[in-house]
Image (cartoon, rainbow, N blue to C red):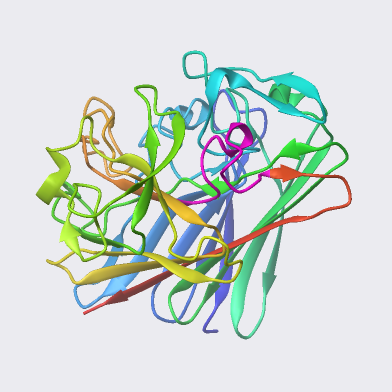
Amino acid sequence: MALFITESKEVHAGFSQPLRFFTLHNSQGMQVTLANFGASVRSLKVPCNQGVQEVTLNYQDPTLWLKNPYYFGVIVGRCANRIGQSQFSVDDQNIRLVNNEGKNQLHGGPEGLSFRFWDTESKETADTVSVTFHIFSADGDQGYPGNFKASVTYSLNDENELLIDYQATTDKACPVNMTSHMYFNLAGTGSILDHELTLHSDRYVEVDEELIPTGRLIDTADSPMDFQRAKTIRQDIAKTEQGYDHFWVARDEKSRTLQKLAKLRDPVSGRTLELFSTEPGVQFYSGNFLDSSIPGASGKPLPQYGGLCLEPHIHPDAVNQSSFPSVILSPGQRYQQSSLYKFSSS
């Protein structure tokens, strides 16, 4: 069978129930292992001329998934990225969120969707194999209004394309802005500094010292933030304050169809990742705060710049920035987002 799914379970101390794993396989040798905790990608192995290689980061110690300080592989939400002062206003009400990064909230709060068990169902067809994760978040969870239901579907085909589809509903107006927090290292080991990156954007969101948007969009031309033409991450990273952790706005930020946001290539192996999304931009994080004292899944240390994130979503802190696209989901509406990760080699 060209496309198929295998399943397994593991019991680990500290988890309230067994971890369930689903591995999607295609005929090219690509394998994507998903877990019901955090609706997460635990492993992503892609083929190239040199064989099949693991290209995502994870922990060697499964109990680190309970706190997951780096958000390895998880779905983040209800609202990805940062919300300044952990508050916003909606329907003339001031909403206070649970903070978890100083006075701000990051990735949905300290007990957000990344730290929950999700319900699962899998499906095999002639063209794709997929797993859908479902979760319910009650009114007031992490401070967010509304009873919230979300689903995330991962689908793998024989073209080495991983598609992630998101849907959500709520019975009270609340911000929704979900994404996947996978870390990529197309070399499989070492640093990502010599990876070549292209971002299809000529503007990025300016942030303050706490990485909260100021509301201004800055032209990338002639700056370290300019990735309109492929360049190594190493080339200009020393000219930034702490490395890259910024949001690049898509050239067509109003498009709701799949458009290319980024291309990442490891020049040594020739492995390439192209990211397409319906979202108006992408957060590029260069792994600035990875800590070599923590061993990764291979048992080797996780060094600074050992992996990078490309997180497609709506502008960060949009709920507090009137000039940014709205992230408010109202009752009767359906949140929908799709992002496609296409792997190849040359």
| Residue visible at 47% across and 55% down in the picture | 281
| Residue visible at 16% across and 42% down in the picture | 237
| Residue visible at 66% across and 46% down in the picture | 326
Numbered-mark total = 0
Tell me if 325 is positioned left or right of 43 in this view: right
Along the line of sight, the residue nearer the viewer: 201 or 65: 201
- The x, y position of residue 137, in whole percent, is 77, 34
Magenta span has 318?
yes
Along the line of sight, the residue nearer the viewer: 19 or 302: 302
Check the picture and name the quadrant holding the N terminus.
Answer: bottom right
- The quarter of the displayed image where residue 171 is located: top right
Q: Main secondary structure of the magenta part?
A: loop
Is 32 drawn above or below residue 245 in the view shown? Answer: below
Check the picture and name the quadrant holding the C terminus.
Answer: bottom left
- The quarter of the displayed image where residue 229 is located: bottom left
- The x, y position of residue 151, in whole percent, is 72, 53
Magenta span has 293?
no
The magenta segment is: 311-327
Tell me if 198 is positioned left or right of 59 in this view: left
Is 310 drawn above or below residue 173 in the view shown? Answer: below
Residue furthest to the top: 103
- The quarter of the displayed image where residue 22 is located: bottom right
Along the line of sight, the residue nearer the viewer: 219 or 38: 219
